[in-house]
Image (tube, helix red, strand yellow):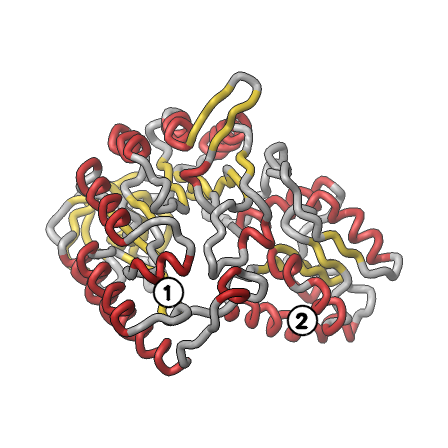
């Protein structure tokens, strides 16, 4: 989502007469777009700010700005402790950046972290930063109404608001006409997308269908779904269209009902399993990825084992796995003590990672001997003699390049695999 936001920022600044520098050492304006969802993300930003502070010392005319969620959450700390930061702009104030830059140029600290109930940047055509020209992100909504106990997003990005579907369809059509062959529709909870204005009443399944109908050569992905909201209607829509990718990211976070209740996730282990069963029923070849948190407040060994058994039962193809890190201001920080020792968090996370590595390897092994349609994204990272792309299930495939080019679809027979990659030959 930060990539999509950065593309909006670049578009706004381009329209105001700014141009991009090829090298940070040549820049007069340096903007750092940030995330606050986990502590280690914030720590990386502090290190990044420290690393670029020397540029300010060499040239006091350089303007440095902090954008996004971290700017919203830590505005006072940023202004007090990092005096070389000139601009602090929250995720709903990007339209004001040209004015904030002008204010900073006059010698004043420029701050705007006001959250909006309406801002979606729907009328702004993002400048694509990913130069592969094949896949791109399209934001369909902003904010979140799910008050998960551990999550800072509702506090730094505000409440949910959906974007006008006509602007989404226009943006996606423009991308396809420019040669892009894959878009990912983005939202904190895409299942909550709803537009009920100007005679339109459209939920996410209907929006997904309209995007898929732009052209059968355009692949559609989306992220992220919420287990309490993902519907049979959505799954049936996915099953009807070959160009809607057969991959769902469905964060579970824990397999323990007690922990899920503490997290305020609003579903149970059993209801999550019901949604997995529905996915298997309507889309048998769908891959499923997830998020897992180890060491949430009061987590016992029994709770941890419940997470492991749910992972095994589901057989996730991929997972993002983290230790719980308390985020100031969240419900968990206010009401629950972060009482799991770091050594226990690490041990449990290691066990989660180890199990997921086995599940991922099994998932890849099961694909050997099958044929997949692969969208070519470019050269393999390891060799220019091989091309790389992804299956509809979001698995990376490499194969000899021959005469193919990026943006083309090819059928690939999978001959073998590594822990992360499928390896094959074109048919």
SS type, badge 1: strand
Q: Nearer the viewer, residue 225 or 377?
A: 225
Does residue 37 sit above or below 350 in this rendering? above
The C terminus appears in which quarter of the rendering? top left
Precedes in sequence: disc 2 or disc 1: 2
Which residue was labeled with disc 1? 293
Residue beneath disc 2 = 52
In the image, farthest residue toward the right: 106
Q: Residue at x 66, y 75 (%)?
A: 50
Asked if residue 411 shows in the view, the reply is: no
Q: Position of residue 349 (x, y in %)?
A: 33, 72
Which residue is more in the foreground, 197 or 384? 197
Q: In the image, residue 176 lies at what x, y percent?
A: 45, 32
Element at badge 2? helix
Image location of residue 151, percent across then percent down? 49, 58
- 375 with respect to 24 (left or right): left
Does 278 sit left or right of 215 as displayed? left
Q: Is residue 218 above or below residue 333?
A: above
Q: Nearer the viewer, residue 310 or 85?
A: 310
């Amino acid at each position: 989502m930060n990539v999509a936001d950065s593309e909006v920022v670049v578009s706004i600044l381009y329209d105001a007469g700014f141009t991009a520098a090829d090298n940070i050492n040549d820049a007069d304006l340096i903007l750092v777009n940030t995330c606050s969802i986990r502590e280690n993300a914030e720590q990386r930003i502090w290190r990044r700010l420290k690393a670029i502070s020397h540029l300010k010392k060499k040239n006091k005319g350089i303007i440095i700005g902090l954008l996004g969620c971290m700017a919203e959450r830590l505005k006072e700390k940023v202004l007090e402790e990092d005096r070389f930061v000139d601009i602090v702009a929250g995720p709903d104030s990007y339209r004001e950046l040209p004015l904030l830059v002008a204010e900073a140029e006059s010698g004043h600290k420029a701050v705007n972290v006001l959250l909006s109930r309406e801002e979606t940047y729907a009328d702004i055509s993002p400048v694509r930063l990913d130069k592969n020209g094949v896949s791109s992100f399209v934001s369909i909504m902003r904010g979140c109404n799910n008050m998960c106990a551990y999550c800072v997003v509702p506090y730094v990005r505000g409440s949910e608001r959906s974007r006008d579907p006509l602007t989404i369809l226009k943006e996606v059509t423009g991308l396809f006409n420019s040669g892009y062959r894959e878009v990912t529709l983005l939202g904190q909870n895409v299942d909550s997308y709803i537009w009920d204005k100007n005679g339109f009443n459209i939920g996410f399944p209907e929006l997904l269908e309209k995007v898929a109908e732009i052209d059968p050569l355009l692949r559609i992905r989306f992220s992220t779904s919420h287990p309490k909201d993902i519907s049979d209607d959505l799954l049936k829509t996915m099953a009807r269209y070959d160009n809607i990718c057969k991959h769902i990211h469905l964060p579970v976070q824990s397999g323990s009902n007690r922990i899920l209740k503490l997290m305020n996730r609003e579903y149970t282990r059993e209801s999550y399993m019901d949604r997995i069963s529905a996915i298997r029923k309507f889309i048998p070849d769908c891959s499923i990825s997830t998020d897992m948190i180890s060491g949430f407040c009061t987590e016992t060994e029994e709770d941890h084992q419940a997470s492991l058994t749910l992972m095994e039962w589901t057989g996730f193809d991929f997972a993002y796995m983290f230790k719980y890190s308390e985020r100031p201001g969240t419900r968990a920080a206010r009401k629950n003590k972060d009482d799991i020792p770091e050594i226990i968090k690490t041990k449990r996370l290691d066990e989660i990672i180890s199990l997921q590595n086995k599940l991922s390897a099994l998932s890849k092994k099961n694909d050997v001997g099958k044929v997949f349609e692969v969208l070519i994204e470019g050269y393999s990272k390891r060799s220019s003699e091989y091309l790389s792309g992804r299956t509809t299930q979001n698995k990376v495939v490499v194969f000899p390049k021959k005469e193919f080019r990026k943006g083309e679809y090819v059928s690939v027979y999978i001959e073998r695999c590594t822990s992360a990659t499928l390896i094959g030959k074109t048919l």
